[in-house]
Amino acid sequence: MTQEKTKTEKIPRQPMPEQPPEVRRRNFDEVPLGYDAETAAKEAQRCLQCKKPACVTGCPVEVDIPGFIKHVADGDFKTAIRLIWEKNALPAVCGRVCPQEIQCEGLCIVGKKDSPIAIGNLERFVADTERLQGTGDLPAKAPATGKRVAVVGSGPSGLTVAGDLLLKGHSVTLMEAFHKPGGVLIYGIPEFRLPKDIVASEVATLEKLGLEIKCNTVVGRTVSLDELFEEGFDAVYIGVGAGLPVFLNIPGENLNGIYSANEYLTRANLMKGYLYPKYDTPLVRGKNVAVIGAGNVAMDSARTAMRLGAENVRIVYRRSRTEMPARAAEIHHAEEEGIEMYLLTAPIEFIGDDSGHVTAMKCLKMELGEPDASGRRRPVPIEGSEFTLDCDLAVIAVGAGANPLLTQSNPEISLNKWGYITADPETGKTTKKGVWAGGDIVTGSATVILAMGAGRKAADSIHDYLKLGW
Amino acid sequence: MFKIVKRAEMAGGTVIENKIEAPRIAAKAKPGQFVILKADETGERIPLTISDIDPEKGTITVIYMVVGKSTELFKTLKEGDGYQDVIGPLGKPTHVEKLGTVVCVGGGTGVAVLYPITRAFKEAGNKVVSIIGARNKDLLILEDKMKAVSDEFHVCTDDGSYGRKGFVTEVLKEILQKDTVDLAVAIGPVPMMKFVSAITKDFNVKTLVSLNPIMIDGTGMCGGCRVSVGGKTQFACVDGPEFDGHQVDFDNLSSRLRAYAEDERKAHEAFCRVHDAK
Ligand SMILES: Cc1cc2nc3c(=O)[nH]c(=O)nc-3n(C[C@H](O)[C@H](O)[C@H](O)COP(=O)(O)OP(=O)(O)OC[C@H]3O[C@@H](n4cnc5c(N)ncnc54)[C@H](O)[C@@H]3O)c2cc1C
Ligand SMILES: Cc1cc2nc3c(=O)[nH]c(=O)nc-3n(C[C@H](O)[C@H](O)[C@H](O)COP(=O)(O)OP(=O)(O)OC[C@H]3O[C@@H](n4cnc5c(N)ncnc54)[C@H](O)[C@@H]3O)c2cc1C
Ligand code: SF4
Ligand code: SF4
Ligand code: FES
């Protein structure tokens, strides 16, 4: 054992090859290029195959991490992916976007002294290998039950519920308001971080399993929840995400050139505005860009603006670096690409020209005061610190809220004070019979894997209900 | 695909009517609501008001003015062709009730948006006075349909080529001076809605306007359609599209509608060049 340990520690964490920053900051191709089989096997050998693997407790869906890594080390990628699928239906996505440093990799025992095992990179590798070279064998489906489930919203949460219930033999119809399925994976997270082909391929697999997808269907408008039951659905899952933009409510915010991150990223990603004029949807291309906020959404917006030709892109954030909520990798990538951080800075007003386009943003410098309700030190303005920042494009990425479109017409579904759906954390059951909910519409903006975890629990509960009753 | 089952041209080909197969939408749509259409894979999402529905046949009708690249592309779609995507019905329906006398004022293609609302007010038992206008005779649309649902009907053209010479606002003023009016509905170009609202405010007559800001999703998720109403930010796609005309900041709306003016002009020219060459 000791001997084996010294042997494994000799291999350093295998770096992920990436497009160099000077190149990638002007293109939309994916940034990390992926492992090859040899590198993957080498990285896999670093894993200690712990008896009580800490990494697994850090993964919200409890992927059998040592199990799949063992197969990678043995070169058996086909078995590796099938083991992951038992817990995670979207590994190519999670390998790329999970905040591994605070989840699986954050708890990896090797990380105590050395760099942790690159679990995300390995997960991505096996998923990509299956997608590109795999057998395409689908998992086995249970015999048809004759029960019908409607899933509302095609984000990671809805896709997980759909996949699980299909395998359990139910018939599933997925309803999506947009013209393409995928939720944030398709309209929010940019191509250079999550290629859209990957999302499309995951969705295609579900279709092969029998999933019926109805895009252009706004539940609450095109069809109501009650009508779904009248149409013969036995259960409904709501996974509509946190699709409400939050604005700063400061003067000048309705000037042209000021977007919510939702709008900016939807124009860029879903509508492919970055390929304008080949695609018809325009978007403002700024020279001096200010992105307000410091989460993943802000990093994605800033890096998109850089790729669309900006000269200066600034992240403007009212707290300090330690409070920045984005994944470590995203902040690192953004800085490498030349994005500047204006920390402890809060916008107070936008200024525009005669044509109504934004030209500048007035800001105040902040300092950290006493901790607030969230336990983080509250930023307080420094008097007389006002300054002006040139900006012809501003993207507001300070969070999202609960979109009331569906919930407002269904008073039986109880909501919390912020408008999110109250659902049982173990089962996802809402207060309306036959209706489950999960993902961002229950938790508020969270992560892909948490939305999937909620979907998995709800699918189990829906399955029980269809067999046994509420 | 959402098939076009009937297509017609009006106003010398500058305004197009499409009857589209969309049974789910036809079954639910109410006056004042709209759809978002996308012609093909690379197309924009364009909002258009539902001008008429036939729930039995499962069709909806939209009427649009050809103003730029996307509507120019829509114009090329023939009977039997279709839109890749049609989403709706979106927006809040008009709140229709029996009030007494309702004046409906429409300008340009705004008349297409106004027609189903006018009909609904008529069906609810109101006395309906309609005033429709256009720049000239050839650009006037839906005259017969509007007439059929009105108790009193006026037409004006800017150049006097048909009906009365002048703006709809002049007729409106005369009516407000002689009659008691319970509600005004004004739909058309932004400056027209702004002037109508200014006049009705003097007479203290409540006024509904239907706003047409640039939209993407139409479900309240992007905030691109935000308008300032009574000093508060509202999303036209979910809080509207109809608002109290006396509260709307029309100047900000005009300015926001020009956000992509330069891009739109270039795209339109490029499309027409390629298309005319064919
Ligand atoms: C720009 C951005 C970057 C992010 N980066 C990361 C990251 O790196 N890592 C990470 O883990 N998480 C990230 N997140 C968070 C993560 O994407 C979300 O937590 C996750 O997508 C939530 O999944 P969901 O299924 O609950 O909802 P969503 O993904 O939001 O999907 C909801 C779907 O429901 C549809 N819908 C809404 N209303 C209706 C209706 N009435 N009828 C029909 N359909 C409807 C929507 O159109 C949408 O497609 C990011 C989020 C954003 C916006
Ligand atoms: C709720 C609503 C209902 C509408 N109903 C009708 C209708 O029944 N008949 C009709 O003729 N027009 C209607 N419009 C306006 C119509 O959507 C625009 O004329 C159309 O989008 C123009 O697109 P384009 O590419 O041809 O022109 P462009 O060259 O792109 O632009 C011309 C004008 O249209 C505006 N516009 C561009 N894109 C959009 C967009 N995505 N959303 C809204 N406006 C945009 C621009 O600001 C500009 O003023 C409606 C708009 C809204 C918001
Ligand atoms: S799903 Fe996410 S948290 Fe779980 S093992 Fe994979 S990368 Fe780690
Ligand atoms: S904690 Fe680290 S070393 Fe242990 S099994 Fe998990 S990945 Fe391997
Ligand atoms: S169009 Fe996006 S919020 Fe109205």
Image: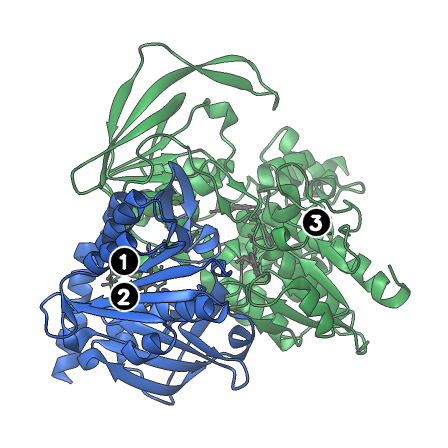
Chain colours: A green, B blue
Q: Is residue A126 visible?
A: yes
Q: Tell me: residue A147, above or below residue A310.
A: below
Parent chain of label 2:
B
Q: Which residue is mark 1?
A: B175
The secondary structure type at the circle numbered 1 is helix
* Contact between labelled residues 1 and 2, with CB atoms less than 8 Å apart: yes
Do tags 2 and 1 sit on the same chain? Answer: yes
User: Distance from label 1 to label 3 (Cα)?
Assistant: 78 Å
Please rate how many residues cluster around mark 3, counting C-alpha atoms within 10 Å: few if below 14, some from 14 to 19, many from 20: many
Image quarter (top left, top right, bottom left or bottom right) of the N terminus of chain A: top right
Kindly identify the amino acid type of the residue bearing the numbered disc 3. Answer: Ile
Task: Please state the horizontal and vertical placement of residue A170, each as a whole percent of the image.
Answer: 76, 72
The secondary structure type at the circle numbered 2 is strand
Label 2 or label 1, whichever comes before in sequence order:
2
Please rate how many residues cluster around mark 2, counting C-alpha atoms within 10 Å: few if below 14, some from 14 to 19, many from 20: many
Task: Please state the horizontal and vertical placement of residue B8, each as a whole percent of the image.
Answer: 30, 85
Q: Which residue is mark 2?
A: B131
- Quadrant hosting ligand 2: bottom left
Task: Please state the horizontal and vertical placement of residue A85, each as a whole percent of the image.
Answer: 69, 61
Checking the image for residue A65, the label placed there is 3
Q: Tell me: residue A436, above or below residue A148.
A: above
Kindly identify the amino acid type of the residue bearing the numbered disc 2. Answer: Ile
Kindly identify the amino acid type of the residue bearing the numbered disc 1. Answer: Ile
Whether ligand 4 has any atom under 8 Å from the Cβ at mark 3 is answered as yes
